[in-house]
Image: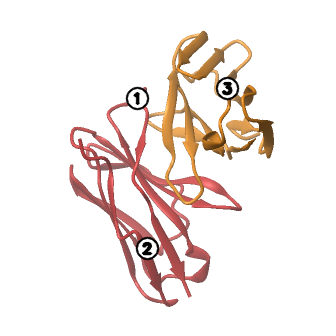
Amino acid sequence: QKEVEQNSGPLSVPEGAIASLNCTYSDRGSQSFFWYRQYSGKSPELIMSIYSNGDKEDGRFTAQLNKASQYVSLLIRDSQPSDSATYLCAVNGPGNQFYFGTGTSLTVIP
Amino acid sequence: DAGVIQSPRHEVTEMGQEVTLRCKPISGHNSLFWYRQTMMRGLELLIYFNNNVPIDDSGMPEDRFSAKMPNASFSTLKIQPSEPRDSAVYFCASNTDANQPQHFGDGTRLSIL
């Protein structure tokens, strides 16, 4: 079992819709959770951090964390074509290691 | 503030040659990470340093790979001799502590012919 699992997609949503990206993790001791966006040919860019159970909102992005279920998700409201990218879920592990998922490819169709 | 700086951005070289990738972390960040990304394997952690000391190098593929961090503002990843299967994008990232996000450099796209 991988430390972090994501549905690789591809996920396609129409412009203006809500995109829902999901991630599960295996280490119950993890305390820090991150979502990164990676455009093709570019480096991963941090878009959200979440540390407590519940929802955290930042503009059109909402991160949701459920530690009991070992589940973290990212909702993108009013999806735009510029949101088309691969989204990586990252979870902290032992020491200062991060475990990264393999990413979910999102395409927003105009 | 300057982000993580990597050089070169692109490197094309022939099999058997030595390759050196360089990274300057964000000032004040005391942890530095080297990753390799390919389509097949995704983002793989190769090695990470804390306060210039290598902590975990279990991801280094084999003895052809070595990494150093002589001071807080500079690290190198060296491949000698290089092989075509080493072709990938290599990222460097840094952060302040275990609960803080890692910030990535622009990466080095390495092609071994």
| Residue carrying label 2 | B10
Residue A107, compared with residue A67, is above or below; it is: below
Give, as a three-letter code, the residue at label 3: Asp
Q: Tell me the shade of chain A.
A: orange
| Residue drawn at point x = 58 percent, y = 39 percent | A99
**Within the image, what quadrant is residue B21 found in?**
bottom left
Dot 3 and dot 1 residues touching (CB under 8 Å): no
Q: Quadrant of the N terminus of chain B?
A: top left
Q: Quadrant of the C terminus of chain B?
A: bottom right
* Residue B100: mark: 1
Can the viewer see residue A32?
Answer: no
Q: Give how far apart the Cα atoms at labels 3 and 1 are.
A: 28 Å
Q: Amino acid at mark 2?
A: His
Helix, strand or loop status at disc 1: loop
- Which numbered tag is attached to residue A43? none
Question: Which mark's residue is nearer the viewer, 3 or 1?
Answer: 3
Query: Which residue corresponds to the image point at 47% horizontal and 75% vertical from the top-left?
Result: B64
Q: Position of residue A96 (x, y in %)?
A: 43, 36
Front-lying residue, B1 or B60: B1
Residue B19 in view, yes or no: yes
Q: Is residue B69 left or right of residue B106?
A: left
Q: CA distance from mark 1 to mark 2?
A: 29 Å
**Whole-percent x and y of residue B56?**
45, 48
* Chain designation of label 2: B
Q: Colour of chain B?
A: red
Q: Which residue is mark 3?
A: A78
Instruction: State which quadrant residue B107 falls in.
Output: bottom left
Which residue is found at the position 79% from the left and 36% from the top?
A13
